[in-house]
């Protein structure tokens, strides 16, 4: 590559990808289940002004995740209003901040070219691109762990006390983003690096006392307040979410979802899928053998970081593909090092723009909104009827978090018609492919996304 040209091209490509993602955040509706569920939890947090306990339902605490991502989403809603853009903006902002950390990390240890290319790879691989504009909790964990890894590396290799403390700050944020998993995902690459390099003395030189105080000062107050407010939280969160969930394939203790039983080792296939299209360049990593002699400590550290999350989840069958997200920045750093030496800058830019172009095409064509999980249009029909014929919004069958979000919490659900005991008229939503016979009088108001809205005058059984 010609450095004077490639740097401008790489900066332009990265900014283009980030701005395209930012500009499309509000152009398609929230989808079930995870995205709409987390957006609704954040909306409830803002509406209730309860910043300690995220709420799964009215008066039902959500013990499945710490609140960092919900705080960010709720604050965004407070600033911009309650809609799709504000729900997703914090994810984009955390992603952009993560890109800056990636660029800074690689620029100091390798080159600006490698840093920009790594940020581009992270932003345009399948999982990185999707998560940068989705309402998820994983983006907060990625940013926290990036800060923790960067700080750990600077502290170990350069004796940089300031960055080492920043690493401890990142660890505290990780505890607020995902919980004790953050400790595991920072300890594993550190242990691998120390075992290979034998630089154990450097570990002792880290500011453990002040750093640990910083980590605990950031995270511990919320954990204490959460347990005091809803006793039982710590037992469920620590034992259930961090032991039973991963050790038991059909764990029945999940209060908020269902088990995701998958074959052992499936996490590695999720990693390949999450890295596409850049996973096609993984064979080039064999060329890193020559660079190991040039800067072995750096590559051992990044390689340990890259494999830690997949290794941790290898023996777990209850997994999601988002679990590999914390490893993607490390894989992006490794790939960037070899891609910069073997691929032209124009090719990198062309590959990087594939997903943004396809995503924009799906949005323009309406395909991104043409899903049965999209309940924005149905809720819009319900709202349009309220002036002339007011009534509650009831879903028959599965709960719809998207409907709750778009109806500001008014949507409710019943499993069967026999559960209805409503004397006042109401609106009923059913999936067209799962219609149930009704023992009361209704007429159809409209249809959208495979769902039917009916106005029912007598729900008294």
Image (cartoon, helix red, strand yellow):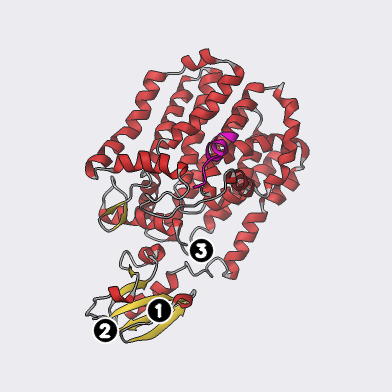
Q: Residue 438 vs residue 102: left or right?
A: left
Residue projecting furthest to the top = 201
Q: Residue 119 vs residue 393: left or right?
A: right
Helix or strand or loop: what does disc 2 sit on?
loop
Q: Is residue 294 above or below residue 229?
A: above
Q: Residue at x 72, y 21 (%)?
A: 293
According to the image, label 2 marks what residue? 458
Q: Residue at x 52, y 29 (%)?
A: 188
According to the image, label 3 marks what residue? 27
| Distance from the alpha carbon under mark 1 to that under mark 2 | 16 Å
Q: Nearer the viewer, residue 133 or 456?
A: 456
| Distance from the alpha carbon under mark 1 to that under mark 3 | 33 Å
Q: Position of residue 448 (x, y in %)?
A: 47, 76
Residue 363 occupies quadrant: bottom right
Helix or strand or loop: what does disc 3 sit on?
loop
Q: Is residue 283 visible?
A: yes
- Name the mark nearer the viewer: 1 or 3: 1
Residue 370 occupies quadrant: bottom right
Magenta stretch in the rendered image:
307-318
Tag of residue 436: 1
Q: Are marks 3 and 2 in contact (CB under 8 Å)?
A: no
């Amino acid at each position: 590559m010609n450095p004077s040209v490639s740097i401008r091209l790489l900066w332009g490509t990265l900014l283009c990808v980030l701005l395209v993602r930012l500009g499309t955040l509000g152009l398609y509706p929230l989808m079930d289940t995870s995205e709409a569920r987390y957006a609704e939890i954040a909306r409830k947090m803002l509406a209730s002004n309860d910043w300690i306990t995220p709420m799964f339902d009215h008066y039902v605490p959500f013990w499945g995740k710490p609140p960092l991502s919900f705080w960010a989403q709720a604050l965004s809603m407070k600033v911009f209003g309650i809609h799709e853009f504000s729900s997703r903006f914090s994810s984009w902002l955390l992603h952009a901040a993560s890109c800056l950390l990636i660029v800074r990390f690689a620029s100091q240890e390798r080159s600006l070219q490698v840093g920009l290319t790594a940020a581009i790879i992270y932003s345009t691989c399948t999982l990185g691109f999707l998560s940068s504009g989705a309402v998820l909790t994983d983006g907060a964990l990625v940013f926290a762990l990036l800060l923790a890894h960067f700080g750990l590396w600077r502290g170990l290799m350069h004796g940089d006390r300031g960055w080492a403390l920043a690493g401890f700050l990142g660890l505290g944020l990780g505890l607020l983003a995902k919980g004790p998993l953050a400790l595991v995902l920072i300890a594993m690459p550190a242990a691998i690096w120390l075992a290979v390099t034998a630089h154990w003395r450097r570990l002792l030189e880290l500011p453990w006392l002040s750093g640990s105080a910083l980590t605990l000062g950031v995270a511990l107050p919320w954990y204490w307040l959460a347990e005091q407010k809803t006793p039982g939280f710590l037992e469920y969160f620590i034992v259930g979410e961090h032991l039973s969930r991963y050790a038991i394939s059909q764990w029945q203790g999940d209060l908020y979802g269902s088990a995701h039983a998958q074959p052992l080792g499936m996490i590695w296939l999720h990693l390949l899928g999450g890295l596409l299209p850049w996973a096609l360049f993984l064979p080039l990593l064999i060329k890193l053998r020559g660079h190991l002699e040039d800067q072995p400590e750096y590559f051992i550290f990044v390689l340990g970081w890259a494999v830690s999350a997949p290794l941790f989840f290898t023996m777990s069958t209850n997994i999601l593909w988002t679990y590999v997200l914390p490893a993607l920045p490390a894989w992006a750093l490794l790939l960037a090092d070899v891609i910069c030496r073997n691929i032209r800058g124009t090719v990198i830019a062309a590959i990087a723009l594939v997903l943004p172009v396809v995503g924009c095409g799906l949005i323009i064509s309406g395909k991104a909104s043409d899903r049965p999980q999209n309940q924005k249009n149905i809720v819009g029909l319900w709202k349009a009827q309220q002036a002339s014929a007011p009534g509650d919004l009831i879903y028959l069958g599965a709960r719809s978090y998207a409907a709750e979000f778009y109806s500001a919490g008014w949507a409710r659900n019943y499993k069967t018609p026999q559960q209805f005991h409503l004397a006042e008229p109401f609106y009923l939503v059913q999936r067209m492919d799962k219609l149930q016979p009704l023992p009361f009088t209704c007429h159809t108001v409209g249809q959208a996304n495979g769902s039917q809205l009916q106005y029912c005058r007598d729900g008294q059984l």
